Amino acid sequence: MPSPVMLPSRPARSRPLPLALLVAGALMCAAAPADGAPTASRDATAGKHRAAKPTPGQVAKRRAVKLRTARRSAVRRTARSARSTARRRAARVRARSSRVRVLRESARRHAPMALVEGRIPGRAPLTGSAPATAPAPSPPVSTGGVLTTPADVPAPPPTEGFAALTPAAPTDAPVAAPPAIGALGVRVSETPAYRATLSRGSLAAGTVRLQLQNEGEDDHDLRVVRLEDDSVAAYLERTAPGRARTATVQLRPGTYRLFCTLQAPVVHASAGMSSTLTVTG
C-alpha cells in the first residue's frame, strides 16, 4: 500500500492591526486605573450597604428585643421604687411607734389627770364634795394590863395641829354650799377607727371642767359648739398623743357637738371623731 503524501502546511499569515486600534487600546490601558478605582470603590460601598440593610424579620426581632429590654428595665425600676417606699414607710412607722411609746411612758410617769364619771383617781371628786372615806380602826390600848378599845379611853385634848380637824360647834347661821362643778372627759383616738368617746352623755348646766385625752397616734384638738345658735362654747388646742388638756368652761342648757377640727389625712369629724352632749337646765 503506498504511503500517503504529506503536504507541507502553510504558516499562518499575521494580519497587521490598524494603527488606530493600537492607539485606542493604549489610551484605554493608560486611563483604566484612574477611572476604575472610583468605580470599584463605589461598587464595594454599594455592595456593603446592600449587605447591611436588614430584612423585615430582623427589624421586627430587634424591635422586640428593645421592647423587652425596656420593659425589664421599667419593672426593675418599679421594684426598686417600691422597695424604697416600703423601707421609708417602715422607718416612719417605727419612728412614730417609738415616739408614741416615749410619750406614753412620759405620760404614765407624770400621771396625767383622767376622768372616769367625773372623778379623778386619787383625788377629790370634781363635783366639789369631799371623798367619803371610812376611818381606819384603831388598835386596842393597854391600860393597867387590861386591853380596852378606843371608845373606853378618853380622847386627849386637841392640840394646835389637830384643832383644824375638830368639827366646829353647830351654829344657827346657814352655811352656803359650794357651787357644784360638773366634769366631762373626752377620749379621742384614730385606731382602729376615728372616734370621740364622752365620759357621760348629759350633765347639768353651769361650770364644767372639760378634759381632752388623746389616746391615738396623731395630734387632735376639741371644739364644743352649741347647736341652737352655732356658738363656740369651748376650744381645746392640739394635744399630742398620750397627753391630756383640761379647761373650765360655762355651758348653757342645750345640745352641744364636740368634734376634732383637724383635716389631715382625712376630715376627723366626718370620719367619726364627733359626739353629742346634752346639757340640762
Image (tube, rainbow, N blue to C red):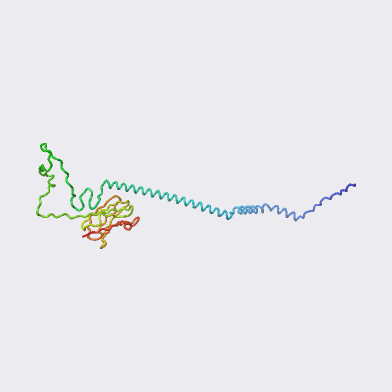
**Foreground residue, 241 or 122?**
122
| Residue sticking out furthest to the right | 1
Q: Position of residue 131 (x, y in %)?
A: 19, 49
Q: Quadrant of the C terminus?
A: bottom left
User: Quadrant of the rendered structure where residue 184 is?
Assistant: bottom left
Report x, y in % for residue 182: 21, 55
264 with respect to 49 (left or right): left
Residue closest to the eye, 184 or 235: 184
**Above or below: residue 46 compared with residue 136:** below
In the shown orientation, is residue 87 left or right of residue 37?
left
119 on left or right of 84? left
Q: Which one is in front, 112 or 204?
A: 204
* Residue 236 lies in quadrant: bottom left
Q: Position of residue 221 (x, y in %)?
A: 29, 55
Tag count in the figure? 0
Measured from the top left, where is residue 92 in percent x and y? 36, 49
